[in-house]
Amino acid sequence: MTKDWYPPAGMRLGATHYVTRSAPWLKHYFGLRDLESAFAPGIKGIVFWGGRSTAKLARRIAWFRRLPYWYLEDGYLRSVGLGKENTLPISIIVDDLGMPVDASKASRLEGLIAGSVEMDVAGLGANIREALVANRLSKYNNLPHREPRLERTTRRRVLLVDQVFGDVSVPMSGGSPESFARMLEDAVASGIQCVVRTHPDVMAGFRKGYLTEKAAGAPGVILLADAVSAASVLDAVDEVWTVSSQFGLDALLRGIPVRCYGAPFYAGWGLTDDRLGEASREALPRRLARPSVDHLAAATFSLYPSYRDTATWEEIDVFRAIDTLVAERNRLALD
């Protein structure tokens, strides 16, 4: 499928200094010798990363200069190592309408998910889903596959996913501190075994989470900060409850029921149990299609992102990206 919303190959593109300095490799995704300054004369468009202050500045420059602009972010299958360790991403997303995490307006991904029902892509999505699950892949793949330390139980076990303050997907999905509080209250009241997936930095006191401090004082709640892969955690639970984390997407790929307290891009399609607050509900009237998980997988991992081999910057497809990440993970495990 042609991604006709992307900038034409070779179009002169500008970006803020933050992007040109921290992500010079982006030029390879657009067939450029270099990304230029957002203030450079003669550029034909502006790209910006994420939804933070530098992105807002770039968007204002684009509006002022009457130039088209595109949102950029990591793809949902990114790398073995972490971005903060300067590991290059094997995929990015490019969107001229909006960010997928922003529930207030439709993104290209939302349109692709809706349109996938009428397209012959369920088989493609099934192959992607099976490959991701079989190879135990997620967005980041740096953590080992190891059974998490959880007490045995005969009760249904539900994973509550904490997120750190500063995660822009929380407010953009219509989530808030109250969303996390409501999620915890619902879980404790249900009598199920509640496992809170918290970030190690939150447990160590370096960062603040939405849920961990409250959960630490809640009866019968287990805090899980084991440095194990998402696949390992999901092997040990029966349901996943989240506000906007990709854990929900990973769970859907594995056939695990998901409850959403925000409106991430995969919510509202009939695939999740949506317990949204008022700020999240505006997305739902737009999401009328009823795709299968395989349609969702095809749109999210194939139709929407771009993949590049980070050694050669050759354009590749999702299946080669999967093979590349598996090979890299195996190689690192041997070192």
Image: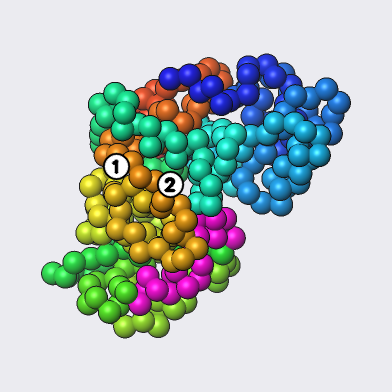
Q: Secondary structure at mark 2?
A: helix
Q: Is residue 330 visible?
A: no
Percent position of residue 118, x then y: 31, 28
**Distance between mark 1 and mark 2 Cα atoms:** 12 Å
Q: Main secondary structure of the magenta part?
A: helix
Q: Amino acid at mark 2?
A: Arg
Q: Residue furthest left?
A: 154
Q: Residues within 10 Å of mark 1 (few under 14, many from 20)?
A: some
Q: Secondary structure at mark 1?
A: loop
Answer above or below: position of 317 versus 110.
above
Query: Is 101 a magenta residue?
Result: no
The stretch of residues the image draws in magenta is 166-185
State which quarter of the image contains the C terminus. top left
Which mark is on residue 290?
1
Determine whether, in the image, residue 227 is placed left or right of residue 307: left
Q: Quadrant of residue 217?
A: bottom left
Answer above or below: position of 242 versus 204.
above
Disc 2: which residue = 286
State which quarter of the image contains the N terminus. top left
Q: Amino acid at mark 1?
A: Arg
Q: Please state which of residues 260 and 17 is positioned toward the viewer in this rendering.
A: 260
